[in-house]
Amino acid sequence: MSRKARIAAAFDAAAGTYDAASDLQRRVAESLAADIKRLTLPPHPRILEVGCGTGFLTRALDAVLADADWTLTDLSLAMLDKARDALSAPPRCHVMDGEHPDLSGPYDLICSAMTVQWFDDPERGLERLASLLAPGGWLAVTALADGTFREWRKVLDDLGLAVGAHAYPTEDELRRWLGGRIRWTFADCQSPHADAHAFLRAVKNAGAHLPVDGHAPLAPGAMRRALRALDRDGGFTVTYRVGFALLNAGA
């Protein structure tokens, strides 16, 4: 099974548990929606949402862009079916790998929350999406940056254990994407959990538990040592370093 097929299967399986497990993803989507609401868009804007999930960003934008012409896409059909009901007017829905869009556009807004990190080549994927913008259109996305899961990484490093989480680009690397035309802001977003077990369970229930290719799962004893180290102070909070990006096709 290809990597993208495994990602789709993981999110298909998590469609019923995603909302309850994804408070941070909801907050990130709402923050991105607040950025988008400040943009100048034409009447009845044509909107493409990439990786819509169950519709966190969709619902946040529909409240103020209810007259938009929406196209929702996701790699997971089960997620797309959940998001379909998030809009006040029926959208176009398309199962699609967001970094290889097979739509023609043009769009006044292309948006995506917490999806770009799943691309094999995020920069090239964003270039393809930006090519679908109408003159003056906007690309508005989030991307995870270096510093994400820093608590989990530190414990595993201290114990000499392999880290299966993806390595995310640095802020400097992100600022160089697309020839530096993207405007980035960054924030540390905290996700508190009752304990480390609850953190890992939430990641799985959100469908985001696939490790990097070639990573072998930790042996049970190693996993127990890591979980004890994470829980030594009671509770566990994990950091997501989130980049919020805006690009204007006329810039």
Image (cartoon, rainbow, N blue to C red):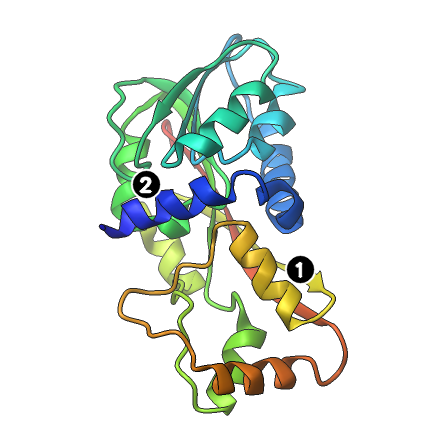
- Is residue 125 rendered to the left or right of residue 83? left
- Tell which tag, 1 or 2, sits nearer the viewer: 1
Which of the 4 quarters of the picture holds residue 54?
top right
Measuring 56% from the left and 27% from the top, which residue is drawn there?
Answer: 58
Mark 1 nearby-residue class (10 Å; few <14, some 14–19, many ≥20):
some
Q: Give the left or right position of residue 3, taking residue 66 as reference.
A: left
- Which structural element holds mark 2? helix
Q: Which mark is residue 121?
A: none
Question: Residue 84: percent from the left, percent from the top?
Answer: 51, 21
Q: Earlier in the sequence, mark 1 or mark 2?
A: 2
**Which amino acid type corresponds to the residue marked 2 in the rendered image?**
Leu
Position of residue 39 measured from the top left corner of the image (x, y, whole percent): 56, 27
Which is more toward the observer, 159 or 198?
Answer: 198
Q: Position of residue 23 (x, y in %)?
A: 67, 48
State the image coordinates of residue 148 (x, y, percent, origin top left): 52, 65
**Rendered position, 36 above or below 168:** above
> Mark 1 belongs to which amino acid?
Ser
**Residue indicated by mark 1:** 191
Quarter of the image where the C terminus is located: top left
Task: Identify the secondary structure beneath mark 1.
Answer: strand
Give the label on residue 126, or none: 2
Does residue 81 appear anywhere in the picture?
A: yes
Identified at 71% across, 85% down, the residue is 232
Q: Furthest-right residue in view?
A: 234
